[in-house]
Image (spheres, coloured by chain):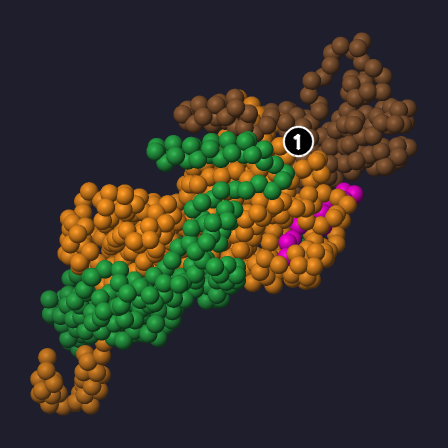
Amino acid sequence: MRLKLLGLAAAVALLAACSSDQDAAGTGSVTGATSATAPTTNAGAVRPGTRQDFEVNVGDRVFFGFDQYDLSPEARSTLDRQAQWLNQYRAVTIQVEGHADERGTREYNLALGERRANAVKNYLVARGVDPNRVGVISYGKERPAVLGSNEAAWAQNRRGVTVVQ
Amino acid sequence: MRHGLILSAVLHVSAVLLAVLGVLPGPKPLEMPVQAIPIEVVDIGEITNTRIDEKPPEPKPPAPRPAAAAPPPPPAAAAPPPPPPPPQQRAPDPPKLAEAPPPPRPPEPPKAPEPEPVPVKAPEPPKAPEPERKPEPPKPPPEPKKEQVAQKPPEQKQPEQKPPEKKPEPKPEPKKEPPKKDPQPDFNQLLKDLTKKEPQKPAPPQPQKQTEVAEASRTPESSAPRLSDRLTMSEQDALIAQIAQCWFIDPGKPGISDISVEIRVQIGRDRTVQRADVVDKARFASDRVFRSVAESAMRALHKEECKQLNLPQEKFDTWRDAVLTFNPRDVM
Amino acid sequence: MTMSAFMTRCDRLARLAVLALAVLVAGAAAARAELRVDITRGTVQPMPIAITDLLGQGQSEGQIGRDISAVVSADLERSGLFKPIDKRAFIQDLVSLQQQPRFADWQVLRAQALVSGTVEPQPDGLVRVAFRLWDVAAQQHLTGFAYRIEPKAWRRVAHKIADQIYERITGEKGYFDSRVVYIAESGPANQRVKRLAVMDQDGENNQFLTDGRSLVLTPRYSPTTEEITYLSFFNNRPRVYLFNLETGRQEVLGDFPGMTFAPRFSPDGNRVLMSMAANGNTEIYAMDLRTRRTQQLTNHPAIDTAPSFSDDGSRIVFESDRGGTQQLYVMGADGSDVKRITFGQGRYANPVWSPRGDLIAFTRLYQGRFYIGVIRPDGTGERLITEAYHVEGPTWAPNGRVLMYFKETPSSDGRSRRARLYSIDLTGQNEREVVTPMDASDPAWSPLIP
């Protein structure tokens, strides 16, 4: 705490230090940060039934068209694998995150993300996954997976991510 | 720069406090010292020893005064103004009355107690001074309402002007409902609208037309001598152009295009305004927006560029008494 | 031309006597009548105003007087309706000004209004701040007030003075003694840290209300300015919360099975509107804060969200994509009588009813750009007043005259962005950045502080 205090005091003197100081004072932990980061390349170390296993060997996300929430054939294929995996590891619970790209207003995107997350959940449930194991949450456009304001980035941000809890 | 520094310092200090106190989901005290300080509105009468010679020490609110007449004949100012309507909106208003400059005003005891709420989120308990907190909350909501009532009505009207106005926008989507919105002559081009790119200046046409008409009528038949007793359209246009330059208007004022202020003026032989009075004194006293438009018109007549009016000297008898009607509809 | 002269002429022209007489009478009457002229045009310019330093008796009072004048001046200037005159041009000294303005000295500067005043120490440690507003041309006293305050409260008093001046001159209530709650942002775009923050309307007195551990969005001030409602992702459960500014207490509003978001207070402060998303459908609900009972207002498989009460609380404007794309709809406060009011291309979102009642501000998306616009509640008179790659979330000043919103500008490499608050007059003029210590979004203006 003292150190933090000192650091802040120093920051006061440095007007420009605002943003870094923010990080210091504001606890780096971010609520529900998408877990999609840090993909593990070391497949050999992956233990079956874990989040890593799911992300690496199953695929944790599906993508949507602009302002859409229907599932594409590719998405269904991914979800089929997810359902299979989930039916294998029945103790696992998941939360499906719905995300939108930046080209929408904040609140509408929250609603849209919820639609997407539910589309994923409903598909998994239809494939035999117990609905009680599936939670949903929408982040709207608050947690982009890819930075940038171009079609490539937007396409990757319009997504439904299945997070193993 | 300095403000920035102070601000930054404040921010950082708060950040430190947040960190130190371990704030968080739990209730955290915010410090907003400023807000917690009660502001007491006191009688302004005592505020200074100013003596305003021109106007008698009317203890009443200043506002009422129907646009004081032109500087020369201060008499107008004497008009017993009714109480200023606008003031009574927010809490502190009451004290306003005191503002009369009259030194006679006794000490501040009068409104002193004004509980000027300053409730605000002062997390800090030190609100000591003012005991009555209750009164505060009630005020906020009502205010906005009042205003609107008065302002709303205006905008819908306005006939003229091209109707569609929507055209700039991409044609309405297929949806069958073509907004049949009435031809809202939407207000002025003074209002920015990114949807309409085409610049269309409305103003010019009119004056020209008028001029033409004027000349037409003036030259031929109207050559009769009697007409010299009136101002020609051209002469009127010159006067209008002059005053329009002096008149500062605010196109964002609610209902502005529907407000029309008549001002009766007496003009001297030297073509300067000797006296000016707002005709509708009742509305001047009760309608704040009307009053502000009226005052802006009065100010226009006081401006240097409008001190001496563009009027034909020889027609003194035709313009010594005039009624100028100020209505910014063409601007809109 | 006299009457008798006319008469003689008439005599000579006997045959036209009758006609001439008629003309004559008419002419004479006209000559006696008033000239009537319609002034239908004017000039759009800010009013030149001379704001002098309030005269302080001592060192510290003098400083307070200068500080107050600077803030009053900045407030009025920022409104776009006033143009403060450079103090260095002032002729009359402050001391004699307190006795009586020499109006000629101010007319020379072309000032139309003049502000004078004093700051005097009081025996109880307070100071008395008094000001007067003068009409220079009419040489008339327009208004004046005095406040007894603790010296450190000078800034609020400055805003109050600016409000009084604004109100007296424009006829509309001011908006300077108000605050803004917004979301302070920091960190990378994919891990943005967002915190609730409040500040004075001019960006001063910035203060954080939350620490950034939980994602928070879309705050709104209560009509009493004592509470803020907002969306928090606390514990990964996005729900609408209420934050009591006096106690610092935060509580969840309602017990909904799904995400609740887009909260808005009713004008009387007794209800909060919010949306709930569950099973892929989003509807608007109203919660009575006294009984905590909720009422569902919309019932449609589309996304219905972003509600906003009309100034009188009788109607609600909201956005819905029930027509295929996001458009604006107006309904009764009980959810009845839904009527679509926008039909333009693109999408219309987060409508906000003006406290003045005459307009609804909104965000519009069209061909990859965002716009802020206004439209009348009946759907007429749409105007788009600003645009950018991304502008969003308009909020009205308490007097319904100025809008604030946020604008995001991507960096050249697209890897980051700058988010800032801006204000703009409803005429579309006078767009300005509202300076914040860090990135900012989702501004919401408070009512005038009671």
Is B80 rendered above or below residue C186? Answer: below
Among the chains, which one is green? Answer: B
Q: Nearer the viewer, residue A49 or A77?
A: A49
Is C273 rendered above or below residue A159? Answer: below
Q: Chain of mark 1?
A: A
Residue A49 left/right relative to C44: right
Where residue A81 appears, x then y in whole percent?
85, 24
Identify the hue of chain C. Answer: orange
Where are the magenta residues, as a range?
C271-283
Where residue C222 appears, x then y in whole percent?
56, 53
Q: Quadrant of residue B99?
A: bottom left
Q: Quadrant of residue C235?
A: top right
Label the magenta part by its dominant secondary structure. Answer: strand
Number of numbered discs present? 1
Element under disc 1: loop
Magenta stretch contains residue C287: no
Q: Which residue is mark 1?
A: A31
